[in-house]
């Protein structure tokens, strides 16, 4: 998993809408599906590749909160495009479905790109450069007309892919001045409550999830409710990624340097890592016995 690139910043995959009230260069990726959650799809992975070939990744567990999900892509310099977003729906460890969208940011505009993972696409095989949408295989390239102003409402779409968005409540068409320059909601439309990490403005102060640093919070690492709980390890959170601060016992070690499985090796009984990650007992007649190599059987 690559570290954050300098050209864009990915916010977390949030359930429902996220608040974007500042004039910045951003694309809000809205991901929906007509597949059953969590029986047919229980996870998401989004990989975003910039024009220089660097890739960032964000994941979401759908078991606690379903779809749609939003992912904010904030441009931080460099060329405006093209960027390639690969959206993968998973069930357990298996990839169930994926979509690809190639898009370009628009300077000082926050726009929405809706991508849906559709049941009709489960068996569809598209040519290179194409991806499956509601109408079948289409180009991966998203035209400027398919990016609509982001109003904070994920809305619904009769075609479930691209094109104008219909909100749950009647309103002006997407190209109207009211949509292009949305007015803030009335102050009495928000009921104040303590701020929690959920992608919403709970305390009605115009900010979302303030007080939660998704880059360093072990209870909300990279996304809300993503708790860094690693086997045999004291966990940390750095750059929105779970890390190992230390192994909880000298008997365990992180020999594969993958923080996601914690300190995975028991040095007391693992032949290839006996007493240390680099010590292998070797041979079929030698065992690791309490961190020491010995001939079978262990004393």
Image (cartoon, helix red, strand yellow):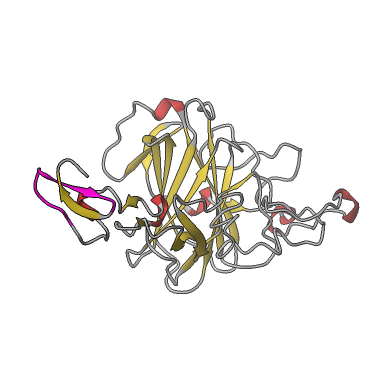
Question: Percent x, y for residue 162?
Answer: 52, 42
Q: Is residue 63 above or below residue 114?
A: above
Query: Does the stretch in magenta take in 283?
Result: yes
Task: Work out whether residue 51 or residue 202 is closer to the camera in this orientation and state it.
Answer: 202
Q: Quadrant of residue 54?
A: bottom left
Query: 46 left or right of 110?
Result: left
Question: Percent x, y for residue 108?
Answer: 59, 68
Q: Is residue 267 above or below residue 32?
A: below
Check the image and name the residue furthest to the right.
188
Q: Residue at x 69, y 58 (%)?
A: 209
Q: Is residue 39 above or below residue 240?
A: above
Query: Does the stretch in magenta take in 166?
Result: no
Quadrant assignment for the C terminus: top left
Q: Quadrant of residue 81?
A: bottom left
- State the count of labels: 0
Quadrant assignment for the N terminus: bottom left
Task: Work out whether residue 22 or residue 173 is closer to the camera in this orientation and state it.
Answer: 22
Chain part drawn in magenta: 280-290
Q: Quadrant of residue 16?
A: top right
Task: Work out whether residue 226 or residue 19 is closer to the camera in this orientation and state it.
Answer: 226
Secondary structure mostly taken by the magenta-highlighted segment of the chain: loop
Residue 85 visible at all: no
Query: 282 left or right of 38?
Result: left
Query: 37 left or right of 208?
Result: left
């Amino acid at each position: 998993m690559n570290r954050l690139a300098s050209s864009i910043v990915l916010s977390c995959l949030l359930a429902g809408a996220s608040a974007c009230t500042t004039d910045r260069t951003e694309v809000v990726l809205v991901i929906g599906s007509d597949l059953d959650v969590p029986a047919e799809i229980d996870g998401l992975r989004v990989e975003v590749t910039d024009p220089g070939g660097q890739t960032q990744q964000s994941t979401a567990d759908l078991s606690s909160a379903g779809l749609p999900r939003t992912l904010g892509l904030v441009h931080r310099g460099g060329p405006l495009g093209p960027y390639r977003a690969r959206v993968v729906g998973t069930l357990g460890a298996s990839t169930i479905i994926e979509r690809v969208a190639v898009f370009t940011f628009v300077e000082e505009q926050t726009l929405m790109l809706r991508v849906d993972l559709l049941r009709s696409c489960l068996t569809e095989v598209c040519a290179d450069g194409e991806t499956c949408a509601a109408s079948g295989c289409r180009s991966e390239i998203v035209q400027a007309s398919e990016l609509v102003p982001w109003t904070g409402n994920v809305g619904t779409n009769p075609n479930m892919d691209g094109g104008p968005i219909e909100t749950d409540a009647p309103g002006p068409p997407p190209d109207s001045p009211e949509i292009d320059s949305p007015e803030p909601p009335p102050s009495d439309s928000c009921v104040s409550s303590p701020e929690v990490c959920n992608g919403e403005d709970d305390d009605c102060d115009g900010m979302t999830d303030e007080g939660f640093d998704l880059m360093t919070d072990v209870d909300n690492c990279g996304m809300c409710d993503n708790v860094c709980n690693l086997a045999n390890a004291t966990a940390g959170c750095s750059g929105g990624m779970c890390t190992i601060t230390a192994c909880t016992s000298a008997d365990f070690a992180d020999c594969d340097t993958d923080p996601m499985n914690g300190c995975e090796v028991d040095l007391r009984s693992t032949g290839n890592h006996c007493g240390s990650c680099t010590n292998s007992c070797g041979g079929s007649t030698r065992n690791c016995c309490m961190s020491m190599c010995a001939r079978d059987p262990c004393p």
